[in-house]
Image (cartoon, helix red, strand yellow):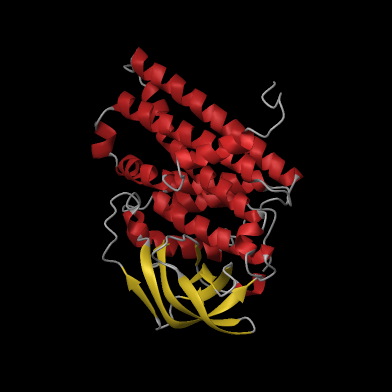
Amino acid sequence: MSIIQDFNLDTLDSLLRTFSERPQALNLDAQLAQLMQALRAGHLDLLPLPGHGDTLQRWQTLARIAGCDLALAKLYEGHTDALAILAECGATPLAGEGIWGVWAAEPPDARAQIVARSGDEVCLSGRKAWCSGALQIDHALITAWADNDLPQLVAIDLTHTRNSLQIDHWQAVGMGITASVEVAFDDTPGIAVGHSGQYLSRPGFWHGGAGIAACWYGAGEALADYLREHCRKPRADVHAHAHLGAVDAALFGARAALRECAAWIDLHPAADASFEVRRVRAQVEQAVEQVIHHVGRALGATPFCRNAHFARLSADLPVFLRQSHAERDLATLGQQLAHVPAGAWQL
């Protein structure tokens, strides 16, 4: 089936509500694989492709998932990003069945190498770090390296016996269930996707980075809703209302930035979106950090200790936010901005 363009948000909300009403709902660990399979069975993983006119709808979906559960969002975003990459690289038929992920982190001490190649068939050795969802997904798109020193996307089957998971270093509390472990390869077979260097050079690389910001926003919005509900109570004090005002201002700016960026991408689908995406990621990150700050100060310890959904989001979100590179991203954004003509900030 091709990537559809009429994704139904109401159907998604109905499915998430069905799971959230189960007795064990607010601890989704045991249900993540089941829920991902339900999303796939209902074709709710076939999001509009970024840059095809419905980028905002794609991001709205990611935000909805993130507001439900960030571990689920991590799996869902990786799966839908993989489908978008396969489509952009002309390899949609590879999608097949099962759940996908994208592993493209490149720390200097963990690199997957292509040690043999015959056409599109390759063999891998070495290691890959930060492999999120390795315990839950079926296939992954990874970046691997050959003699030309350009990253090559490779599709791998995680059920293959020549993959081994190294989980002993994973000690996370926040985002703990996603288990971003190391995977070791020993002549592991794979299929090359696209041409060398295409993962980074394609327009969709930056489009996907903005999709991560939509996840940040969705989780921040869900936390903010707890404060809004608190402020509906007759006993809510002026300090809580002040915190709610600050939260609204932060989310309003982030929401406007995401909408503007989505519209820009749809108008310029083949353009380099690095500047626009770095800026929107910075905007959303700062807004969500403000939400975390104000919601915690307004509500105190109670929801952290007595509300499973709130506590889990609060533990997971700071870890998920660290997909940003903080000041390094801001420095690169500033370097890009220094070359923008005067007047770029005019209203």
Residue located 36% across and 21% down the image: 233
Image height of 313 relative to 38, above or below: above
Q: Position of residue 78 (x, y in %)?
A: 51, 59
Q: Residue furthest top?
A: 238
Tell whether 320 sits left or right of 27: right
Picture coordinates of residue 35 (x, y %)?
44, 60
Residue 241 place in picture, x, y as percent: 40, 17
Say which of 190 and 159 sits in front. Answer: 190
Looking at the picture, tell me which residue is in the foreground, 2 or 344: 344
Q: Is residue 233 visible?
A: yes
Side of 53 relative to 17 (left or right) = right
Q: How many marks?
A: 0
Quadrant including the N terminus? bottom right
* Along the viewing direction, whichever of 272 and 49 lies nearer the viewer: 272
Residue depicted at x 37% and y 58%: 178
Left or right of 153: which side holds 105? left
Residue 224 found in image quarter: top left
Question: Residue 143, position in %: x, y?
Answer: 53, 67
